[in-house]
Amino acid sequence: MDYIKYEIWKRRSALEFLTIALSKGRILGETMELFNRIKMHFDNVSEDSRKLVFEFKDYDMRLILSKPTDVPTFVEHGVADLGVAGKDVLLEDRKDVFELLDLKLARCRMVVAVPEDRAPGVPIYRVATKYPHIAESFFLKKAQPVEIIKLNGSVELGPLLGLSDAIVDIVATGHTLRENHLKVEEVICPISARLIANQVSFRLKSGQIQELLGKIKAVV
Ligand SMILES: Nc1ncnc2c1ncn2[C@@H]1O[C@H](COP(=O)(O)OP(=O)(O)OP(=O)(O)O)[C@@H](O)[C@H]1O
Ligand SMILES: O=P(O)(O)OC[C@H]1O[C@H](OP(=O)(O)OP(=O)(O)O)[C@H](O)[C@@H]1O
């Protein structure tokens, strides 16, 4: 495709299609099941493929696969009209997007966890987390000054290695905490995947968005 044709294709697709940014990883399977429940079948959308943009002319829809933390960025900038993102990512990054619906997928909890053998009442000074903003506002509300140490994963290592007294992280089955001799000290909030919308698209493409929203609401 030459450059001009490519530009025309890009602009036409953006206008004609409803573009939805999906999170690769854990949420993707459950999101595709949700679409199946509303009789929308998106064949070949899988992170096993290296393809990242999928067009479905029958539905006037385009799906893009992105890292979970990037979904709100694509939606805020309007290159995706809608997105499916975890509430954890929305709370952490606070992008300017509309949160339309709790999809009740990928349900888990954001918690403060500490070593199993930690005596009650011992103060927390250092917290390791992938979610520095969530952790900061949680401890700020409690007027408890803590040092936040940002990690990008395997945060359970923080207390194990003596890097931190506690972690702020997601717990689902509790398996990871148990395996690493940690326990939940406090629940910060429940987490699940949300349907989000670009603020301009929400008005410009309200017909398409409301139709899809109605179908999804009927099954969640
Ligand atoms: N253990 C879990 N059980 C259920 N849902 C989870 C769990 N961990 C994370 N989630 C939810 O699923 C979303 C995506 O998580 P996933 O593990 O696929 O990606 P990530 O670890 O956030 O990103 P990446 O691995 O690409 O850095 C999270 O934003 C959260 O909302
Ligand atoms: O309660 P569980 O069911 O054990 O799930 C909780 C784990 O899942 C997530 O980690 P993830 O697998 O995304 O890896 P990460 O540590 O690299 O973020 C989270 O950060 C916990 O470590």
Image (cartoon, rainbow, N blue to C red):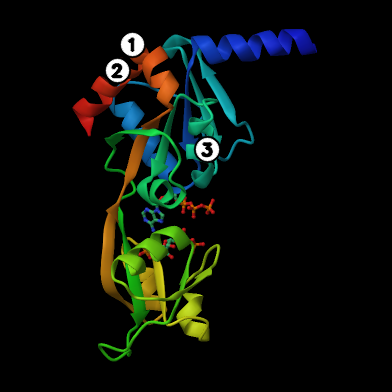
Q: Is mark 1 within 8 Å of ligand 1?
A: no
Q: Residue at x 37, y 16 (%)?
A: 203
Q: Which residue in the protein does label 1 denote?
A: 207
| Percent of width and height locating residue 152 | 55, 62
Q: Is residue 121 above or below residue 17?
A: below
Q: Which quadrant of the view contains residue 11? A: top right
Structural crowding at the residue carrying mark 2, measured as other residues with C-alpha within 10 Å and reported as few (<14), some (14–19) or many (≥20)? few
Question: What amino acid is labelled 1 in the image?
Answer: Gly
Q: Which residue in the protein does label 3 denote?
A: 73
Q: Which quadrant of the view contains residue 66? A: top right
Question: What amino acid is labelled 3 in the image?
Answer: Thr
- Tell me the element at label 3: helix
Q: Earlier in the sequence, mark 3 or mark 2?
A: 3
Q: CA distance from mark 3 to mark 2?
A: 22 Å
Q: CA distance from mark 3 to mark 1?
A: 23 Å
Q: Residue at x 31, y 63 (%)?
A: 173
| Percent of width and height locating residue 177 | 37, 73
* 66 relative to 30 in the view: left or right: right
- Tell me the element at label 2: helix
Question: What amino acid is labelled 2 in the image?
Answer: Gln
Q: CA distance from mark 1 to mark 2?
A: 5 Å
| Percent of width and height locating residue 57 | 49, 11
Q: Is residue 104 above or below residue 142?
A: above
Q: Residue at x 73, y 8 (%)?
A: 5
For marks 3 and 2, give the one nearer the viewer. Answer: 3
* Residue in front for this viewpoint, 135 or 162: 135
Asked whether the beta carbons under mark 1 and mark 2 sit within 8 Å of each other, the answer is: yes
What residue occupies the far left of the structure in this picture? 218
